[in-house]
Image: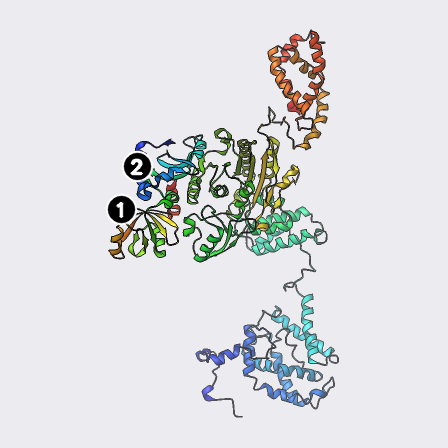
Amino acid sequence: MGRKLDPTKKEKRGPGRKTRKQKGAETELAKFLPSAGDENGKRLSSRARKRAAKRRSDSVGAPEKKKLSPSPKPLTKGAIQSSQKKGPQAPGLKIGNEALFGPARGKKRPAPPHSSDEEEDSEGNDARSEGDDWASMESEDDMVDDYGVASEEETDEDDELLPIEKAAQKQRAQEAETLDQWSSEDTDEEEEELSSQPTSKNDEANGDLQINVEKDEKFVLPTGKEIEQENILLGQILEGGAPDLQSVHQRIQDIVGVLRDFGSQREEGRSRTEYLSRLRKDLATYYSYGDFLIGKIMDIFPLSELVEFLEANEVPRPITLRTNTLKTRRRDLAQALINRGVNLDPLGKWSKTGLVVYDSSVPIGATPEYLAGHYILQGASSMLPVIALAPQEHERILDMCCAPGGKTSYIAQLMKNTGVILANDANAERLKSVVGNLHRLGVTNTIISHDDGRHFPKVVGGFDRVLLDAPCSGTGVISKDPSVKTNKDDKDIKRCAHIQKELLLSAIDSVNAASKTGGYIVYCTCSITVEENEWVVEYALKKRNVRLVPTGLDFGQEGFTHFRERRFHPTLRSTRRFYPHTHNMDGFFIAKFKKFSNAIPQSKKSDAAANPEDSMDSRLGDGPSVANVQVVPRPKVSPKSAKKPKQAGKAKFAKLDTGKAKFVRLGTGKTKAKLGAAGKEKARQQQQRPPPKKAGFQNGKPVHKGPRSPTARTSSSSQPPPRKKQKSRS
Amino acid sequence: MRPLTEEETRTLFQKLSKYIGENIQLLVDRPDGTYCFRLHKDRVYYVSEKILKLAVNISRENLVSLGTCFGKFTKTQKFRLHITALDYLAPYAKHKVWVKPGAEQSFLYGNHVLKSGLGRITENTNQYQGLVVYSMADVPLGFGVAAKSTQDCRKVDPMSIVVFHQADIGEYVRHEDTLI
C-alpha cells in the first residue's frame, strides 16, 4: 500500500507536450471501451465514455468510501442520526463541498447533497454513488467555470439547458429536498423525483427548448407577409437567395396534415383556399416547379397523392428493356446478360418480353447482345400502347409518330415480320435512330417515311390499325426531363392539344373501318394533363364515327369522366392512366378507338355534327327543345323555305332535293340518332311539309305561291343561307 | 425509288457473291414471297414486293428507308456493303471466322482481327476472300476480308492481321448517323 507513484509509470499532467502523448493501446482503449456492467449497457457519448474510463481508473479511491456506508445504512431510514454519521459525514461533507463545485450533469445524477445535517443520510447515499463522480470531477476542477459547470458540457443526450439554468435547477432541487426529507426514503425514489422535476420544469419553462408538441400545438399558418419577413430576418431575400428548404418542407407536411383533417386542425379565421395557396407556393419552391404546372398537378391529384407524385418525379424510373423475339427468347437473353454481370428480373406478368435492370457492371446499351439486336431499351409504359393495339399478322399498320422506333419494332415483332408497317415521323433527326434501331433489331417489313402526320390519309390510307403516340407536353416524364417543370405553360398545353386533335383526326381517317381484322386506333401520350388526354379523346368522339373500346390492359387508373367543370362521355372509363408514383412507370395515357364507319360526319359552316352516330345517346335531349325554339320565331320563313324547292326550277329542285332527301332520309330512318338540332328540326318539318306541298304541287297550283313567286325565286336563291342559319343557330 | 440498272445489279451481285457465293438466288426467291432490290438515294434496299406496293405511294423526299438497306453506291459507282445486311448474309455465308472472346470487343471497335484473336476459320479460305465474322457463341459480328489464306494463317506470328475489318455491329452505336 505504498503511494501509487511508480516512477516508471508516472502519468504526466498539465498542458505540456508529454501529457498529450498517447500512452499505448491498452490504456487508451480502456478509457473508451465500457467494462461489463459498469454503465448498465447504456450508450454513452464520447465525453461520458471518457468520464467513465476515468472513473474506472480512479475507482481505487472509491471503494474506501463505499465501505464506510453499509453500517449506518440500515439505521438511516429517515432517522436523523448525527453520531453515526460522523464517519460518512466527514467524507460526505467533503464530498458535498466538492459537489457544490461539481456540476449537475443532467437528469442522470440527482442534485448534489445539501449541507444540512438532516439530509446527510440520503445525501450520503447519493454522495456515495456519486462519490466517484465527484472525485473524478475534482480532477477536472481546472475546467470548472463560474457557474459551477465544467466548460465542456455534453449536450447531446441530456436537456439542452443553459449553464445558469442547470445551476438554478440545482438550487431548486436542494430546496425541494428540504421540504421532502421525510418522504424520500430511497435514493432511487429521490432520484426519480429529482429527475422528474427537471423535466416538468422544462415543460413549463421555456420556448427555445425543442420539445415534441405535435399533439398539443396546432400548426399556425403564416401569411405570405410573415414568411417574407421571416426570410428577410434570416438574411435571405426571396429573389436573390434560396429560401430555407428545410422549413418549407416542414410547412408542406404540416399543411397537408391540416388539410387532411381540416375540421379539427384548422386555425380559426383561415380559409381552405389560404392553406391551399400557401401549399401551392411551398410545393413550387421545394420541388422547383413553375406556378402553372404545380397548379395543374394540384387539380389532378388528390392531396394524398400529390406529394407522392412530386417525390416520384424527382427519382428516375428503373431501366427496362424489351426482348426482341425475332432473334432470341427472354430466357436466353436473361441468361446471357446475367453472365455478363447484369442484375435483372422479369418485368411483370403483363409483359412476356420485358425485363427490368436493377444494376449492371457493363453498359447496358452497348453489350454485344444489344449490338446483335437481341433487345432494346424501352420504358415500361411505352410497351403498353402496343399491347393495347394488338397487331395481327399480315396487317397494314401505321405508326404516326414512331421515333425512336421502340413501339414500331414491338409491333413488328408481334407481327413476326409479316404484313407492312409504315413508320412515320415529322422529325428528320430522330428518324436516324428509327432506321438504326429497326435495322439492328432485324425488322424487315417496315417503310420509314418523313412526313407530317396530318398529311396522312392523303398520302396513303386504308390501314388496318394506327398507333398515334402524339407529341405532348411531357408532364408524365418529368423525371427524365426536369426542365418541363418550369418551361411549360398554358400556351404550350393548348398548342399541344391542338396538334394532337388534328393528328388524331388524321389517324382516324387513315383507318379502314371495313377492315376484316382491324379498324382500331390507339391514341397515347406521355402526359398527365386532362387537356391533352380526355379532351382530345372527347373531341374525336364528337367529330368522327368512332367509339372507345377497352384497351385490354387490366391495370392502371381509369381515365376521368368528369374533371372540374367539364363532363366527358362515360366510355372514357375504358381509357387508362398510369402514374410514376403508383405504377413505377412514366406517366402515360392510353385510349383505344374502334372505327365503325368510314363516312366522315359532315360539318358545315358551324362544325356541328349532323350525321348519326349510334353511340351518342346523350344528345337526344337537345333536339326537341331547340327545335321548338326555332319553330316559333320563324314561322314564316320555314314554310317558305320548305316550299321554295317546289317552286324553284327543276335543277335547283333537284339539287336541293338531294340535300332535302338526305335530311328526310335521316329523319325517317334513325330517329334515335344524334342529330344537330337543325337537322332534326329540318327533318321533322320536311316530313310534315312535303305531303301537303306535294299535294299542292300536283294540283298544279300551290296554295299561296302566286304573288310570291318572284320573291320566291329570289329567296329561293337565298335558300341555302336561311337553312344554314338555322343550322348554325342550333 | 427505282429498280437497279444492269450495271448496278452486276456490281451488287459481284460484291455479294464474295460473301455468299451462289446463294444469291436464295435471296431473291424466298418461300415467303419475291424480294427485290431497289435503289433510293444511292442506297440499295432489299424489300419484299408486298411492301414495295405500299412504298410507291410515298414521295421521294419523304421516303427514308424501306425493308433492309444492304449498302450504298459510292460516287464512283462502287458498292459498299453495310452492316445492316448482316442478317441476310450471315446464314448463307460460305466462309466464316470465329474470334475469341478477348478479341471480340476489339473487333467491335473497328479493329482488324489479329492471329492471337483468331478462334476458328473455315477451310480453304483464299486470300482476300469475303468472310463473315462470328463470336464463339455463333453470334454474327460483322464482315471482313481474309488477309491470309487458311494455310498462311497457321504459319504467321500472333501479332499479324488475319482478317481485315469491313463492317461490325458496333457501328450501330458508333456510326448511327451514317446508317440513314
Q: Position of residue A215 (x, y in %)?
A: 69, 60
For residue B128, which numbered disc appears in the image?
1
x and y percent of residue B23 in the render?
Answer: 35, 41
Q: Is residue A96 above or below residue A371?
A: below
Q: Is residue B41 above or below residue A292?
A: above
Give whichever of B157, B43 is nearer the camera.
B157
Look at mark 2 in the image and give the residue it sits on.
Answer: B11
Considering the image in quadrants, where does the N terminus of chain B appear? top left
Question: Left or right of A483: which side holds A219?
Answer: right
Do discs 1 and 2 share a chain?
yes
Q: Is residue B121 left or right of residue A225?
A: left
Occupied quadrant, residue A665: top right
The answer to whether A614 appears left or right of B27 in the picture is: right
- Residue A189, position as x, y percentages in the image: 70, 77
| Horizontal and vertical percent position of residue B43 | 36, 36
Type of amino acid under label 2: Thr
Sequence order check, earlier mark of 1 and 2 = 2
Q: Which quadrant: the C terminus of chain B?
A: top left
Taking depth in this image into account, of A221 and A23 the one nearest to the observer is A23
Q: Residues within 10 Å of mark 1 (few under 14, many from 20)?
A: some
Subunit that carries the residue with mark 2: B
Q: Are marks 1 and 2 in contact (CB under 8 Å)?
A: no
Q: Which of the two residues, A256 or B76, is positioned nearer the viewer here?
A: B76
**Residue shown at 70% from the left, 60% from the top:** A216
- Read off the chain for label 1: B
| Left-right relation of A164 to A28 | right
Where disc 2 sits, the SS reads helix
Residue closest to the far bottom = A1
Measured in 3D between alpha carbons, the distance from the residue under mark 1 to the one under mark 2, in whole angstroms, is 17 Å
